Amino acid sequence: MSLIAILGALLLEQIFPLSSYTKLRLSLRNAIDFIERALASDDAKPWQIFWFITLVGALLAGLLGLIFTQINWLLGLAFTLILLYLTLGIRQFSHFFTKIRVAINAGQGDVARTELAAWLHEEAEITGYRGNVVPEKLSDTEVIRQSLELALLSSLRYVFGGLFWFLVFAIVGLGPAGVVFYRLSDLVSRRWILRADGKRDAYTRYARKMMSWIEFLPARCAAMIYAVVGNFEDAMHCWRTQAQKLRGLGETDAAAVILTSGAGALNITLRDGVMVKNDMPMDEHEQALYGETKPMTDVAKDDELTIAGQIGVGAVPDVRSLQSAIGVFWRSMLFVLGVLLLLTLSKALG
């Protein structure tokens, strides 16, 4: 039933793309804020708020799934399918990526920069971006690099992360609980990180710690899948040699793993180097986004700035890299569905 629900949700999203993901996430964030304020009045600690929201939400989804399945398995399937449709959103990020690819391919750099700016604003929780976008400071190559980074991160948070926990909980018949658990954990942690505005308070530290554990296995599963369907040797090499350095520069564990393996699988170089200033990593396209004008070649002249880290070992990405990324992603989805089909058949025949 899990395979049918996943297939149904993916097909449903392609045929009837949900146009109000932003409103849905806003509603969830408002609900999270309401619950947090209620718990904060009782001097609840960060871990108590985090686990209350995530576990209660997951428990409700799991119980509803069981109740519907007990009434009629078709009703349970429909509930699971709709829940996956609302939480596993390829279209939550693919429409921006597609618009940027089309604009770059047509030579409309200004349109691509505008779309990237809109994407960064909408997904501020993912990127940690809080500055004012300066689109005219991005070259086409920088737009492509930033788009590929965002797409790789979004593929984990909107597809592979939720799918992993759905399948883990599905082992005990509670698949809906797994995907809700991941989505709520992701929303709570990003809400806290964005609200902290770069400061490391107790909520931010706990959110980062929990998401590093929750995304530990999903990120590595996604990285392995990218390696299998892409350039295996480069993906494994980049993951093995570059991820640890990126973690040392401030990237989250999941971001370091998915970016290095994804760049290797695509045989491209996403970052030539990372500019470190006041413990905040920035590369050349990020410095343009944040309004920094100091070129990378001037870094060595400033005692406060150093260059370290690299993502990928291949060529500089171009418009063909955007198309290649789409191919790698869909091959990844076909690989996952193929493995699930084999497991389902072996269980049915065994």
Image (cartoon, rainbow, N blue to C red):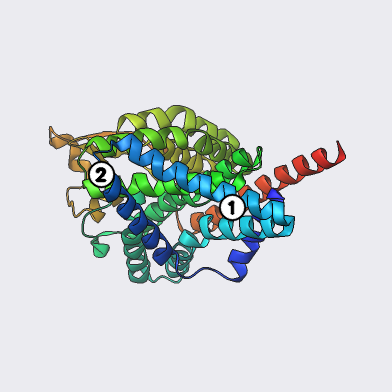
Residue 169 in percent (x, y) is at 60, 40
Residue at coordinates 81% horizontally, 43% vertically from top-left? 345
209 to 5, vertically: above or below:
above
Residue at coordinates 64% horizontally, 52% vertically from top-left? 67
**Secondary structure found at label 2:** helix
Q: Give the residue type at disc 2.
A: Ala
* Of the image marks 1 and 2, the number of the one nearer the N terminus: 2
Viewed as shown, does residue 336 lie left or right of 226?
right
Residue 323 in percent (x, y) is at 54, 58
**Secondary structure found at label 1:** helix
**In this rendering, does residue 177 appear at all?**
yes
Residue 44 in percent (x, y) is at 28, 38
Question: Which residue position is annotated with label 1?
Answer: 64
Packing grade of label 2 (10 A; few <14, some 14-19, many >=20) is some
237 to 84, vertically: above or below:
above
In the picture, residue 254 is in which quadrant? Answer: top left
Residue 155 is tagged as none
Residue 40 is tagged as 2
28 to 294, vertically: above or below:
below
**In this rendering, does residue 316 appear at all?**
no
Residue at coordinates 12% horizontally, 32% vertically from top-left? 303
In the picture, residue 111 is in which quadrant? Answer: bottom left
> Which of the two residues, 86 or 128, is positioned nearer the viewer here?
86
Residue at coordinates 55% horizontally, 45% vertically from top-left? 177
